[in-house]
Amino acid sequence: MPDISSKARYIMIGGFLGAGKTTAVLAIAEQLRARGFRVGLITNDQSHGLVDTTMLAAHGFDVEEITGGCFCCKFNSLVDASKRLSAQTRPDVFLAEPVGSCTDLKATVDYPLRRIYGNDFAVAPLSVMVDPTRAARILGLSEGSSFSKKVIYIYRKQLEEAEIIVVNKIDLLPQDKVDELLFALRREYPQASVLAVSAKKGSGVFSWLEAIESGVARTDGAMSVDYETYAEGEALLGWTNAAAAVDADDEFDGNALLLDIGQRLHQLIAADGCEIAHLKLALSPGEGNDLAVANLVGTGGTVEFSHKLESPLTDGELLINLRAEADPDQLRQRVFEVISIPTIAGVRLKMLHLESFRPGKPTPTHRLAGV
């Protein structure tokens, strides 16, 4: 890793909803911390109550959360978050994870950071992660449910501006399918280096980090983006965030509860014929830093754990982040139906927060053609 004592390294990891960005951010952060670097993390979402922030903080990292819009539209908030982290821990490296439905990050985040705050940050090449199953479907390599054309427009624009494309979760596919996907991505997006990793298992992460540190980020040429199509694509996605208190008279298996809730939501939304972009659930006990996190990517997928609770619990808090190509009021109703069940396996649930919405039209603070 080069000498970054004079400037903090700014590493942005983009990619569509469900690509596994948060697990990847955590994997890179832990590698950097093991080398003795101070690391600050910045998460981003259209609203608050993020599973991502909870998970990263549970691993002992300083995390700032930017809500109410993507980095491009909340650029000043992004800089302010960096300053707060600098005041607290003086990070050598900032790892920033933008909203999964956001694109045009080079022109609206990377270039403005370089031009306005070039004395403070050394900006790394932009990494864009993909879930291999979803990428294979969108590239026409396999069949299965996917999104409508305007949502896919955003997905492909993310790949078009990437300097490093990272195929995540390669442990889920046979090697010949991984090789086929890597070949297709290199053919269609020759401007990017294409790597394969399993962030969950840690394989390939070291090589990816080396590519970030040795790569030279592009400094001119903003890609063409139809902001009307971009806005319409985002507006097709419904977002629902919820929080609920859970408690029981006796100790219970929190992992089983989280799986049960995730499967109930999956069944309801699948029955509605909606395509799930990403369903994230987290359960934390009332005391301590233990945490369970479960994910579902795609309506045809299954609920899987990225972290499990080590011990039973008697009370705690449940977070749900659901994004799907669906009416947000419909998603809200489905979450409400599940959380309103008086008890699940003897565990009581009480709704603390529930909201649903569609993202507004992206309006970048800055948009530059280069530096």
Image: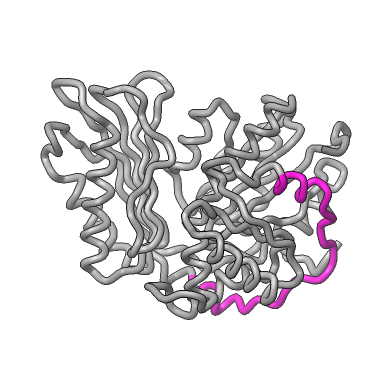
8 part of magenta stretch? no
Residue in view at x 51 percent, y 78 percent? 140
Q: Indicate the position of residue 89 as horizontal and vertical percent values.
A: 69, 25
Residue in view at x 41 percent, y 76 percent? 143
Left or right, 118 with reference to 33: right
Residue in view at x 44 percent, y 43 percent? 50
Q: Indicate the position of residue 346 as horizontal and vertical percent values.
A: 12, 32
User: Does residue 359 sit above or below 28 in this rendering?
Assistant: below
* Observer able to see residue 87: no
User: Does residue 276 sit above or below 1 in this rendering?
Assistant: below
Residue in view at x 59 percent, y 70 percent? 180
The C terminus lies in quadrant: bottom right
Left or right, 36 with reference to 230: right
Q: Along the line of sight, which residue is nearer the eye, 227 or 51?
A: 51
Q: Along the line of sight, which residue is nearer the eye, 315 or 30?
A: 30
Q: Which residues are magenta?
A: 207-233
User: Does residue 281 sit above or below 315 in this rendering?
Assistant: below
Q: Indicate the position of residue 338 as horizontal and vertical percent values.
A: 19, 49
* Observer able to see residue 274: yes
Left or right, 88 with reference to 266: right
Q: Indicate the position of residue 35 as horizontal and vertical percent values.
A: 74, 28
